[in-house]
Amino acid sequence: MQQRTTAPEAQMMLSYARMLSHMKPRVLCIDDEPKIGLFIQEALEQTGCFFVESETNALDAVVTARRFRPDVLVIDIKMPGLDGFTVARRIREEPWLRYRPILFFSGFEYEVPLHAADEAPMEFLKKGVPLLTIVQTIARLAGERLDLYTPFERPERILADGQVEAGEPT
C-alpha cells in the first residue's frame, strides 16, 4: 500500500530537491488583466530569485500549471469563465501540484474557504497593497529568504482596477 505524502513532507522534499539542483522557485501568475500578471512577473524577475510565467486565461492556466509545475501560484479570484477558487481546485487535481502554496490576489475582500486551506498554505492579499508586500509574500510561500538576495525597493501598488500607482520610495 502506497503511503500518502503530507503537505509539510511535500514542501520539505521540494525544498531539498531545489537545494540540490540550485533551481529558482517557479511562480505562475494567473490574472485576467494582462498588465497585472506582467507587472508581478517583472518585479519577481527583478529580484533574480524566481522563474515566472503569467497566464491571462483561467482554462489555459490549468494547462500551463501542469507544464510549468510552479512552486507557488498567484491567482486572481474574480476572472471571466472560471473563478480563482475553481482554477486552484483544478490545478490541485494534479498530484504534483496538490500541495503548492497559493496566494489569492483580488480587488475584492474574500476569505479563503477553510476546506481549501487543508492541503497547502493559502493566503489572500487585496489589490492595493505595496508591491514589496506581494513580492515578500510570494518569497515566503516559496521558502525563499529574499532579504538575503537583493535589496528590493519598489513602492508601486497594484490597484483593483488594474492600474499601477506610484508610491513613495522607502
Image (cartoon, rainbow, N blue to C red):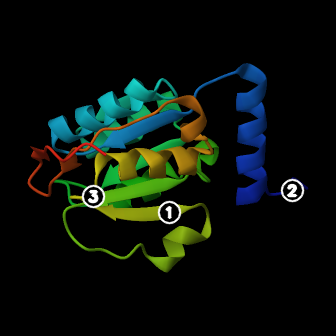
Report the front residue among 58 and 48: 48
Element carrying mark 3: loop
Q: Amino acid at mark 3?
A: Val
Place residue 52 in its image quadrant: top left
In space, the residues marked 2 and 1 are separated at their CA atoms by 24 Å
Asked if labels 3 and 2 touch by Cβ distance under 8 angstroms, the answer is: no
Q: Is residue 28 left or right of residue 120?
A: left
- Along the polypeptide, which appears first: circle 1 or circle 3? 1
User: Residue 66 placed where, x, y %?
Assistant: 49, 35
Question: What residue would you read off at disc 2?
Answer: 3
Seen in the picture, residue 73 relative to 150 is either above or below; the reply is below
Report the front residue among 126 and 133: 133
Q: Which mark is residue 122?
A: 1
Label 2 or label 3, whichever lies nearer to me, is: 3
* Neighbourhood count class around disc 2 (C-alpha, 10 Å): few under 14, some 14–19, many 20 upward: few
Question: What residue would you read off at disc 3?
Answer: 129
* Neighbourhood count class around disc 1 (C-alpha, 10 Å): few under 14, some 14–19, many 20 upward: many
In space, the residues marked 1 and 3 are separated at their CA atoms by 17 Å
User: Residue 136 placed where, x, y %?
Assistant: 46, 48
Q: Which mark is residue 48?
A: none
- Along the polypeptide, which appears first: circle 2 or circle 3? 2
Q: Amino acid at mark 2?
A: Gln
Quadrant location of the N terminus in the rendered image: bottom right
In space, the residues marked 2 and 3 are separated at their CA atoms by 41 Å
Element carrying mark 2: loop
User: Residue 13 placed where, x, y %?
Assistant: 78, 42
**What residue is shown at x 56% (from left), y 33% (from top)?**
25
- Along the polypeptide, which appears first: circle 2 or circle 1? 2
Asked if labels 3 and 1 touch by Cβ distance under 8 angstroms, the answer is: no
Label 2 or label 1, whichever lies nearer to me, is: 1
